[in-house]
Amino acid sequence: MKKWIFSSLFVFYFVQVTFAQFQGQTVYNRVPIGQLLAGGLPFTVEPNEKIEGTPFLYDFFSDCYLQLKDKKFYSGVKVRFNLVTNKLHFQNEKGQEIVAEDGNVLKFHFSVPINDKEAESYTFGCGYPESPGTTAFTYFQEYNSGAAGFLRLVNKFVAERKTIATVDPVKAYEEKDTYYVYNSVTGKLIKWRKGKDFILDMLSDKATEVNKYIADNKLACKNPEDIIQIIQHYNTITK
């Protein structure tokens, strides 16, 4: 499976863009656990030595910023994200692992250290229009903040593969990424397709300005980095 490699400078850029949703907001230092617990179900990890890997984005819990359904922003909760179920798990005050009920958490943002000097940051949000295979409660990774956005739907599933060293197939969690473009002005959420025609259609209300920006910056519109840059420009001219 092909992986997109972003430059470290660009990673820093879109991390700042997505985290900007939380900046300038009143952030409460204590999550109202009662809100998260409402309807949430306990989760117990069942060790399965027959499946390699993890169903989570990261196995460990990370400190997180949350926007709850009351639209307020909070810190002070540890979470991990289940990519098989597309569910957010958190630790309550007793250290128990709870699966957040659909709709309780609108957005969440956390960072994971890569080394002593760098960290990889993620912002996920739900509330997008339904599309084949997604609902209003599906979390997408967000690469833009504003009227439009480039989104990543990341899923894990159990796959079997045969190896020379084993008689039985080996089971392992594998990851599948699907990218989308969303425009809140038109209400469209569509799987991303490479090429200028697609992105101009998705940003049709500013097609002339976007087309000029693409030409001026010699963008091929064939990789996520170009699309994120184009959408961010669109957001600056769309109020």
Image (cartoon, helix red, strand yellow):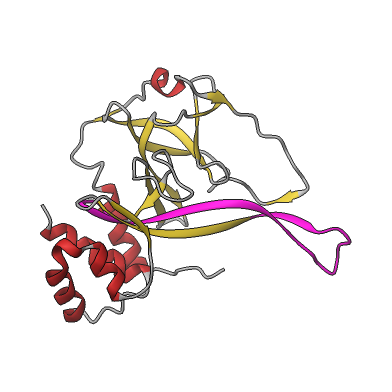
Where is residue 9 drawn, in percent x and y? Answer: 32, 67
Q: Which residue reaches farthest right?
A: 167
Between 182 and 91, the one nearer to me in the picture: 182
Q: Is residue 182 above or below residue 165?
A: above
- Residue 111 versus residue 196 in the image, above or below: above
In the picture, residue 204 is in which quadrant?
Answer: bottom left
Q: Which residues are magenta?
A: 144-173
Q: Is residue 7 visible?
A: no
Q: Measuring from the top left, give residue 200's x and y in whole percent.
A: 23, 69
Q: How many numbered circles does the render carry?
A: 0
Q: Is residue 31 above or below residue 52?
A: above
Q: Residue at x 49, y 59 (%)?
A: 177
Left or right of residue 155: residue 136: left
Predominant SS along the magenta part: strand
Magenta segment includes 156: yes
Q: Seen in the image, is 85 located left or right of residue 172?
A: left
Estimate the x, y position of residue 61 in percent, counting from the top left: 51, 38
Residue 132 appears anywhere in the view? yes
User: Which image quarter is the N terminus in?
Assistant: bottom right
Q: Foreground residue, 59 or 212?
A: 212
The image shows residue 55 at horizontal and vertical percentages of: 61, 46
Q: Is residue 15 magenta?
A: no
Image quadrant of residue 194?
bottom left
